[in-house]
Amino acid sequence: MKPLFPLTLALLGTLPTLAQDNCASAVPITAGTYVVSTVNGNQVPSPICAPNGAGASAGEWYSYTPTSNYTVTINTAIGALTDSRVHVYLGGCGALACVAGDDDSGVNNTALLTFNVAAGFTYIIAFDNRWSSSGFTFQLVESPIVIPVFSFSPLTLPAGIGSTVAAVDMNGDHLDDVVRVTELQITINHQQTGGGLVQTVFPTDTADTTPYWSLAAGDLDGNGYNDLLYAGGSATFMLANADATAYIENSQTEWIFCQRSNFVDINNDGHLDAFVCHDVEPNVYYLNDGQGNLTYYQGGLGDTPDGGNYGSIWVDYDNDHDVDLFIAKCRGGVGPANIDQLHRNNGDGTWTEVAALMNLADNQQSWSSAWGDYDNDGDMDVLQGASSFTNGGHKLMRNDGSTFTNVTVGSGFDVHSGQSIEWITHDFDNDGWLDVLGGGKLLRNNGDMTFSLHTVTPTNGPVGDLDNDGYLDIVNGGTVHMNALTGNNWLKVTLEGTVSNTSGIGARVEIQTPAGTQIRDIRSGDGFRYMSTLNAHFGLGQESQVDQITVYWTSGIVDVISAPAINGTVHVIEGLSTGVATVTPEATLSTFPNPVDNVLYLSSSLPLRNANATVLNTAGQPVLRSVLREATLDIAGLAPGVYVLQVEQEGTLLQERFVKR
Amino acid sequence: MRSVLRSRAPKSLALASLCAVAFAACTHELVGPDPAPDDAPADPVLVDLPSLPYPVLSTYRFFVGELDQLEPNAGVLPFAPINALFTDYAHKNRFVWMPAGAQASYVSDHEPLEFEEGTVLIKNFWYDNTAPDGERRIIETRLMFRRNGAWEFANYIWNPEQTEAYLDMGGGYLPIAWTDSEHGAMSTTYRIPSASECFTCHKVNTDPLPIGPKPRNLNVDMAYPDGTMNQLDRWVQEGYLAPGFPSGIQATPDWTEASLPVVDRVRGYLDMQCAHCHSDERHCDYRPLRLALPDTQDPVNLGVCVLPDDPIDASVTHIVAAGDTTRSMMHLRLSSTDGSVRMPLLGRTLVHREGLALINEWISSLGPPCP
């Protein structure tokens, strides 16, 4: 019967369908062509599965139960080219859950939606009058099922006020949360340990500026909870209180034409600082002394007099384990303000601008750049994505150590006609190769420095793992586009600094697998506007083991974790994961607490009284000697850092590492 | 005694009535002895170029009598371009001063006049009927002066007493509330620009440049104390403009002139609000719009059915979606006060309702729908 129905319709011309005013009266349909005479049903489709939010006042409802697995296309550009919008649900009328939706993918803003269906399930298809109540004709076409390279399912968040700016952990559980802000409140959808996003609104004092240009997150005050930086016409900090149950507003007075902002430890003193790109002046930053004082500076990190600074990204391009600064720049006309800059961290508090030296001094108009190790050879490459093609197109630059080599031709970026202010990289399909989101496409890394273009529903927005399934999700406005892929292995690494900043921002995380090496830098602020997860996420493809995780902290401390379990999260506390492994089998020494503030408590299988105790720094130099009178050691005078305690008694030397806060 | 508002003479009959209303509204300020009796010439304007900018505005002696009357000194010539940039409904007036022997020369209808060393352009910004006591409040006086063959900026912020204005290149904010007959009670946090903000709009490539004094913007009558006259002719008479420029300079369409075709009004409006960035070699020339008057004969340069480089909002399909304001980036930009969405980005925190209505009228009139 199935083929007959559309045939009949075709013979009769247009047959108005009736009785589809609400979900309960949804008209069952099969593949075929149907006429909607006018969009006037009393039930407005909700949740909204398509772009462009609320605004509809009526709907038209159909139900569809496929007999086989298909790839289905719904196309509203069959007759009149009405500006139509469609939503597709599962779950029945009482519990509609989005499967897919579309607004404008067809010609003249008609809807054109392709999605996969499973045999026997009933899909509810609803059109609304977001743009027009005029009638139209739509076609539902069944095709042999094609498993997509990328697939996302929309999840609508409860209504919250403010624009979505971050997908980052806010309550210290290292599970990404969704953050939306206004000048008066922070709305956080906290990811629960068992799954689900629970919304809480935190009223704040009035922020002098909202993050209308960008937002960054990081634990500025080192209390274990991420704080926020609103970058608009100035900088406003929102500081989490001692248990992240309230946010304390701290607005700075300096006028700044903000663009990308970042938290980063600029002077490597263990405390996060705040960096802000200035559109029309030299860049600015606030140095944090760790005592609650922020001091404003302008100059030294991108000093073009009239600015042009749009996309700052802190990346260790030269593998010397300190953070360097790349700035994607943009400016009309002729002048230095649109030439990208790379500021090499010399490690001694000085910086050298080396973009020309490294073949990256490009006047292409760019608002952000996507840095990642696209060829998994152990160093960071860069996609300089164009915001406008007026000064040249996208450039894929391979890091060859002494220079960057333009490998755009044939890479896929040479045929990518999309432009955008946002360019980011993540492994969205968990195949072990970093993909790129930008210019309205998701570009899949084919593993050979070529990329294939894929159309996906989500556009650029904050990226995090919001259902803790190891696949990265994308937030657009009030919708979380949950990554619907499965089947590849993965590993996440979460960081807790003790000597370095608590967020671990600036750390390099490296994994070794039988297939090779993957690297991530922990960044507060990539792309142009949004704040994405601070967790290091690695896709593993079909690899079933990780041999080793190495974390290079900004303090210089290196932690190594051997053979972690995969398809899970490894939490690394700075300084606690490197075995010194010299404890003699028959004697033991342990210390408590760790990290420690002032007094270290010792316990040992040997008597400690009158034992010689020596504390060595990471360079092996003794910094404290003492003859123990009791089982404690006063280390209040030590600077924060990682140390080795040696205790000598009865001819036996025992060693134990500890971290001084 | 004349008030500044009388000397800020209207540029058209349509505006003359508005000005008269405004004048009536502030006559209560105009008390006290005549600050500049005609029989006692004031000291001349003082512009010692190497010493510029002076710490305070009064040093220049651009204005005689009580400073806040903004009564121009001899040689300080008022002018008014046909269209004005919207700056949160602030009132403005403008003057030009030149040293002895200096004069501007014509370059083209559409380019600013070429000015000589020592020329100063002066622009005052104020609100009338401000809260709480209904007084006029002058906020700032912006100068551009020509030194060593280049333009420089100097901005003066007025004290609350309105007795002096002080050099300040760092910019600032001033919360202000006022009432006007068209909009009722209004308020904003007025942004006084920093030097870098001035430069962002007033430049070509990296060279500072004035925007308003282009021949086509000045080719209109203005009421001077001694009678109404075409501004270009007046400049020549004053010795401020070299004669011999071409006749037939086409005047910029006045966006407020309801008798003009809507597209011409739109072109005039966008020329003044937007073209200083959306033109070749300007701040935002990497976007497709070209909004200077000579360019907007072509609807493509106005953005009609042009895809945005970056749609900002997924509902936007074109910079100008013919017949559909809600799908038009230009509508979104002009109706927004979000700091990263609004256009212009600088100089505006409020929606210019009348300008937006004009843009909407124009977009709605366009057809057929964009493909």
Image: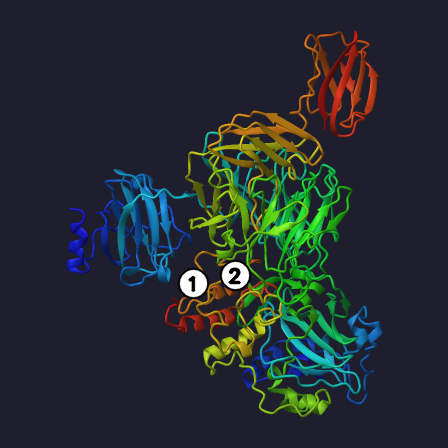
Q: Nearer the viewer, mark 2 or mark 1?
A: 1
Residue at the (42%, 35%) spot, across then down: A486
Decide: marks 2, 1 in contact (CB < 8 A)? Answer: no
The amino acid on which the numbered mark 1 sits, given as a three-letter code, is Thr
What is the x, y in percent for residue A563?
56, 24
The CA span between labels 2 and 1 is 12 Å
What is the x, y in percent for residue B3?
69, 80
User: Horizontal placement of B170 versus A43: left or right?
Assistant: right
* Chain letter belonging to callout 2: B
User: Element under label 2?
Assistant: loop
Residue picked out by circle 1: B326
Residue at the (59%, 55%) spot, across then down: A367
Classed neighbour count for the residue bearing mark 1: other residues with Cα under 10 Å, few (<14), some (14–19), many (≥20): some
- Camera sees residue B298: yes
Classed neighbour count for the residue bearing mark 2: other residues with Cα under 10 Å, few (<14), some (14–19), many (≥20): some
The coloring applied to the image is rainbow
User: Horizontal placement of B147 versus B136: left or right?
Assistant: right
- Camera sees residue A180: no
Q: Quadrant of the C terminus of chain A?
A: top right
Residue placed most toward the observer, A38 or A310? A310
Residue picked out by circle 2: B336
User: Horizontal placement of A264 versus A146: left or right?
Assistant: right
Residue at the (75%, 40%) spot, across then down: A289
What is the x, y in percent for residue B58?
79, 74
The amino acid on which the numbered mark 2 sits, given as a three-letter code, is Ser
Name which of mark 2 and mark 1 comes first in the sequence. Answer: 1
